[in-house]
Image: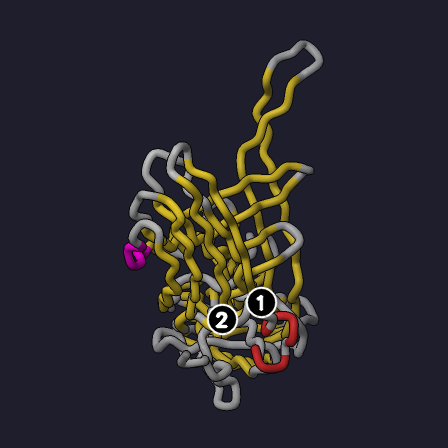
Amino acid sequence: MLSTIKKFLVTYNGFGVGKTFSSGDIISGMVTLEVANHCKIDYLTIKLKGKSEVLFPGGRFTNSGDLRLVRCHSKIKFLRDVLFIIQKPKGCNVVAPGKHIYSFTFRIPLKAMPTSFKGDFGKICYTLEATLSRSRRRNRKALIEFPFISKVNLNKNPRLMIPQRGATEKKMFFSGKVGMTVHIERQGFYLGEEIKVVASIENRSSCVVKPKYTLYQKQSFFARGRMKESIKNILKDLGERIPPSKRQTVTKLIKIPQNISPSIKCRNLHCEYKLKIYLDVPYALDPEITLPLVLLPAVQMRGQQPPPRSLH
């Protein structure tokens, strides 16, 4: 038996051309319904939804001492709006054979919500979901995700403008000491920006040392009182060699990739970044300094330009 419903889908204006949305924006689109025969509909709705969802395997010991696998799952909803396109009274809505287009418009609430994200054990997603209900039939659903960006003006966030600094010193076996002081101009940066890293290195040893730089990402997922972490290096770079018995100040520009996720902090999901600067020292543990970073979505609006960077 052929289905009465031939096509049921939802789309939004700007789909496929890289359009993104933020708090306060208007998102509009259409629901397409194509039926083969006359069709009675109880209701047709479109929902605007946003959620953060985490899922990872865990384990716990039973009273007998056996390890039992458990499913660690957490879901937090922070956006929900519903629009009725076709509504009751039940059975009075009859759709004729053919294709029908229903337009809709939502305004995304003007509140703080995290940027869309897909991680190793969780995601933050924003969707438009259409639901078609008919008597004595299973509901039909059509869903599409849309990209959401949480925009933050760095110039209006004093905490992210505070300079970051770190220092370390290492005594080397039979070879003197090496020390390093590092500073960057602030904690917050936009994706695609350059981080100016200034390192004052004192090499009071008989060895050549080299500064190295690593930008890494840590994803943390929380569910059922447990935590799952995933750490990955985003980029690595190498600095100038520092000869023995020399003191030198070196400057390095670290280009932040534009195609990575910004920093995120939800109740059940974190995405954090740190910049590690360390000295490659022969035959010893490398002294290192780690500076926390807050990476913001790339500038998309006029008036949200990165702060000026010192050239010296």
Q: Residue furthest top?
A: 64
Q: Which quadrant would residue 15 be assigned to in this image?
A: bottom left
Towards the viewer: 17 or 5: 17
Residue for badge 1: 41
Towards the viewer: 62 or 217: 217
Tell me which amino acid carries mark 1. Ile
Q: Categorize mark 1 by other alpha carbons within 10 Å: few (<14), some (14-19), many (20+).
A: many
Mark seen at residue 107: none
Magenta span contains residue 239: yes
At a point 51% along the width and 50% down the height, the residue shown is 168
Tell me which amino acid carries mark 2. Phe
Q: Is residue 180 toward the left or the right of residue 55 in the image?
A: left
Q: Earlier in the sequence, mark 2 or mark 1?
A: 1
Q: Name the front one of labels 2 and 1.
A: 2
Across and down, in percent, residue 105 comes to 56, 82
Q: Is residue 64 above or below residue 176?
A: above
Alpha carbon separation for disc pair 2 and 1: 51 Å
Across and down, in percent, residue 256 comes to 39, 66
At a point 46% along the width and 48% down the height, the residue shown is 288
Towards the viewer: 11 or 138: 11
Q: Bounds of the magenta span?
A: 237-242
On the rendered image, what quadrant is the C terminus found in? bottom left
At a point 39% along the width and 58% down the height, the residue shown is 247
Q: Are marks 2 and 1 in contact (CB under 8 Å)?
A: no
Whether residue 40 is visible here, answered yes or no, is no
Across and down, in percent, residue 220 comes to 56, 47
Q: Categorize mark 2 by other alpha carbons within 10 Å: few (<14), some (14-19), many (20+).
A: many
Q: Is residue 252 toward the left or the right of residue 46 in the image?
A: left
At a point 63% along the width and 23% down the height, the residue shown is 60
Residue for badge 2: 189
Q: Secondary structure at mark 1?
A: strand
Q: Secondary structure at mark 2?
A: strand
